[in-house]
Amino acid sequence: MATCFPFLPIWLSDIIGLNKTHTGIVFSCISLSAIAFQPVLGVISDKLGLKKHLLWIISVLLFLFAPFFLYVFAPLLKTNIWLGALSGGLYIGFVFSAGSGAIEAYIERVSRNSFFEYGKARMFGCLGWGLCASTGGILFGIDPSYVFWMGSAAALLLMLLLVVAKPKPNQTAQVMNALGANQPQITAKTVFNLFRQRRMWMFILYVIGVACVYDVFDQQFATFFKTFFATPQEGTRAFGFATTAGEICNAIIMFCSPWIINRIGAKNTLLIAGVIMATRIIGSSFATTAVEVIALKMLHALEVPFLLVGAFKYITGVFDTRLSATIYLIGFQFAKQSAAIFLSAFAGNMYDRIGFQETYLMLGCFVLAITVVSAFTLSSRREIVARSNTVEANQA
């Protein structure tokens, strides 16, 4: 993902020549494609368990990253914006937006099965992102196509890891499976029943109102970032190095985040993440120097661990853990991408009409407002336990 999303808005504007509205259309198509695939991948991932079939499909498509971008996506964008946006949306939406969520859900399942914290495993993803971002920033200044070929090469390493990795269920799970006591009952009815729960809708409200709006803000942030530097090349290199520095900090915080989150609780973690996101968006609306915009970019290192690990902790603490991948891909990823279809195009149009900073102020105030509302609507594990005890007492 580090060879795609950080530099995608720069590539679309500087290399392909799209304006901000057309860039927003591309991101909307990515979101539209993602929402079509994420629920399906969520259910498939839960059914497959520790099997790697889905990961192999994603890996093969990742290997085709450079050929697709250079020989299919770019020519179509220059010929017809809608054909290009739809083709790119299908590929990026499946491989990166939906595929990354499926891989993260798989890693989280392996971490629970092997009794190690997901945040510590995810830390290496941050380090990889940081390394790719700095390398990509340098290569982009030399030849943008090198960034895509680097992504295809990384797919070969992923395939090698899939061959080597052999996750096994723990002994307790094996015994329970043999007795038939641990068979997952994942049906369409089970999935639909999730949407009858108030806490599911309140979680989705937070995801759309906070995480989705923040993602839309970050989509074209690289283009905004470049405006604080003398030349676009200097801005792209600086963006790459700032991303790397942020991801190193991200990795350190990701390693420590389980310890922090286990003490403050998943709900409070999500609220803190919301405050950090609102601060970065609103702060960007008042930034006037390169130093300020770099400092605001670094806040991303705090937001990612708290949002990502906090979301998984919230899902496994509040909902049925057998449906963790389904809830993550539907309640988190699917919800974000669904709203982003409209918000990406809206934000792109607002950037062209009133500018980045005025739009950022609107988005930031909205994120802050939803974060305050979520303080009263999100559920804590303590509330769930208390509610369960009350129900059991009434039944007795």
Image (spheres, rainbow, N blue to C red):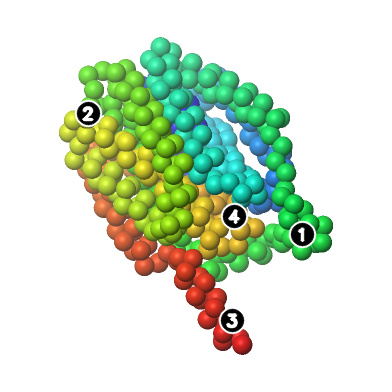
Q: Earlier in the sequence, mark 1 or mark 4?
A: 1
Q: Earlier in the sequence, mark 2 or mark 1?
A: 1
- Asked whether, in this view, residue 146 is left or right of residue 345, the answer is right
Q: CA distance from mark 1 to mark 4?
A: 19 Å
State the residue at coordinates (59%, 55%).
324
Which residue in the protein does label 3 denote? Answer: 392
Which residue in the protein does label 2 denote? Answer: 290
Q: Is residue 3 above or below residue 255?
A: above
- Asked whether, in this view, residue 342 is left or right of residue 55, the answer is left
Task: Find out whether the residues at labels 2 and 4 contact each other: C-beta distance under 8 Å.
Answer: no
Q: CA distance from mark 4 to mark 3?
A: 25 Å
Task: Find out whether the residues at labels 4 and 3 contact each other: C-beta distance under 8 Å.
Answer: no
Which residue in the protein does label 4 denote? Answer: 324
- Quarter of the figure with residue 388: bottom right
Q: CA distance from mark 2 to mark 1?
A: 57 Å
Relative image position of residue 367 (x, y in whole percent): 32, 53
Q: CA distance from mark 3 to mark 1?
A: 26 Å
What is the three-letter code of the residue carrying label 4?
Ser
Task: Find out whether the residues at labels 3 and 1 contact each other: C-beta distance under 8 Å.
Answer: no
Task: Find out whether the residues at labels 2 and 3 contact each other: C-beta distance under 8 Å.
Answer: no
Locate the C terminus by quadrant: bottom right
Q: Earlier in the sequence, mark 2 or mark 4?
A: 2
Secondary element under disc 3, as helix, strand or loop, is helix
State the residue at coordinates (54%, 47%).
117
Nearest to the observer: residue 133 or residue 201? 133
Secondary element under disc 4, as helix, strand or loop, is helix
Which residue in the protein does label 1 denote? Answer: 176
Secondary element under disc 1, as helix, strand or loop, is helix
